[in-house]
Image (tube, grey):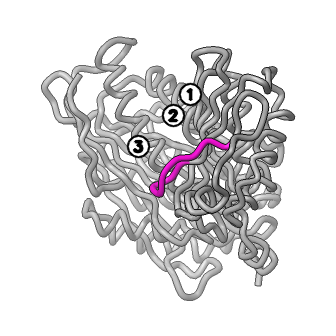
Amino acid sequence: MEDIVKTDGSVTAAKGFKAAGVAAGIKYTDRRDMAMIFSEAPATVAGMFTSNVVKAAPVKYDMEIVKSSPYVQAVIANSGIANAATSAQGMEVCRKTAEHAAKVLGIPENAVLIGSTGVIGEQIPMDKVTAGIDELAKQLSDTRQAAADAEAAIMTTDTVPKEIAVTFTIGGKTVTIGGMSKGSGMIHPNMCTMLAYICTDCNISKEMLDLAARTDIPDTFNMISVDGDTSTNDTYLILANGLAGNPRIESRGEDFDTFMKALHIVDEYLARNMAKDGEGATALFEVKVVGADNKDDAKKLARSVVSSSLCKAAVYGHDSNFGRFLCAMGYSGADFDPEKVSLDYESRAGSIRVFENGSKKAYSEEEAGRILSEDEVTVMIDMHSGNAAATAWGCDLSYDYVKINADYRS
């Protein structure tokens, strides 16, 4: 298996992909709010979407395109308005967006995917969308800046961009995967408002691309939580145009394993950084569970702790109240023996064990507080009962979270 190299790239890193981001004035007046990703060659596509029963129009639209279209070549996304709870008019906006983009780009209408993020319940002004598409098509470029512009255009309450690219070798050919995502609040995926777009020049069948996405997302994007709210708009799309020229991946094997390893690096990086940039967050809150009886229990335990408001508040306050973490484990739905559990706090400042064999360890509260004061904090939980492990990512819960969401529509 060849080495996988991280680069400062994004959705334009892979061969044949271009992007653009413009200020279309859909809702915001002072920022980019509309993005386009374009593949020069037809691309296979796979997607994962929110499990929320209230699905935004672009989610329902994309689900059908991913299922039925032979290939795709473009993604049009906007921020500011989510196009959710917009009934038939919202679906018509998606159809007209795809129709206009197809005409401008010279591709089939069913080769266009749609994404939206922002306020629920408002209608998107179609005149601004069509004007935005015209401008986006003019500005399409394969430069790093073009990708950055596209990322900026889908950000809402995000404070930093989330972008990454990796290169690796399959069959003697250099293959690239590049991706970008947004999401800072309403993050608790079950596939936030979360959008993630991954572009690769790997030559891979639709069936294997779908398998790759469905295999990796449960361990990456579905292991993050900011506030426990599963959005109406959660969308993960991966496009593969085959321009790397590697032998086509049509079944499991070494080439597929290499692709999966690279995709996992991209997905985990984007997911982890979405959690770190949670609304009002001051620290990444990571929970690692090891020694569990099975993977399902390990995931339940990690997600329960990382999603707990009390645990998140303790991290914000640098409070080594391990009882909160044990409590969240106890209602996770996993069956375990508390007498076997050990619990440690870890960060760049060090590591300290606070709980073991059913009772509190003798430890320095001052040292524990110092460890919990870093901007990335890990709670390490060893169940001492098996070999399964899982990691979940979240963030602390600060006063600013309430301020941001109380003023979200203002």
User: Is residue 134 depicted above or below 169 in this figure?
Assistant: below
Q: Nearer the viewer, residue 114 or 271?
A: 271
Location of the N terminus by quadrant is top left
Give coordinates of residue 137: x percent, y percent: 38, 66
Depth check: give the residue in front, 28 or 226: 226
Q: What amino acid is at disc 1?
A: Arg
Q: Residue at x 66, y 38 (%)?
A: 343
Query: What residue is at 58 percent from the left and 42 percent from the top?
Result: 221
Quadrant of residue 42 within the rendered picture: top left
Residue 91 seen anywhere in this rendered image of the structure: no
Query: Is 347 one of the magenta-colored residues?
Result: yes
**Which one is in front, 273 or 138?**
273
* Res. 46 mark: 2
Dot 2 alpha-carbon crowd within 10 angstroms: few under 14, some 14 to 19, many 20 or more: many
Circles 2 and 1: CB atoms closer than 8 Å: yes
Label ID, residue 214: 1
* 229 and 199: which is toward the camera: 229
* Badge 1: residue crowd in 10 Å (few <14, some 14–19, many ≥20): some
Residue to which mark 3 is pinned: 266
Q: Which mark is first along the chain, 2 or 3?
A: 2
Q: In the rendered structure, which segment of residues is drawn in magenta?
A: 346-354
Which numbered marker is on residue 240? none
Kindly state the secondary structure of the residue where label 2 is placed. strand
- Element at badge 3? helix
Above/below status of 132 relative to 38: below
> Dots 3 and 1: beta carbons under 8 Å?
no
- Relative to 143, does residue 111 appear above or below in the rendering? above
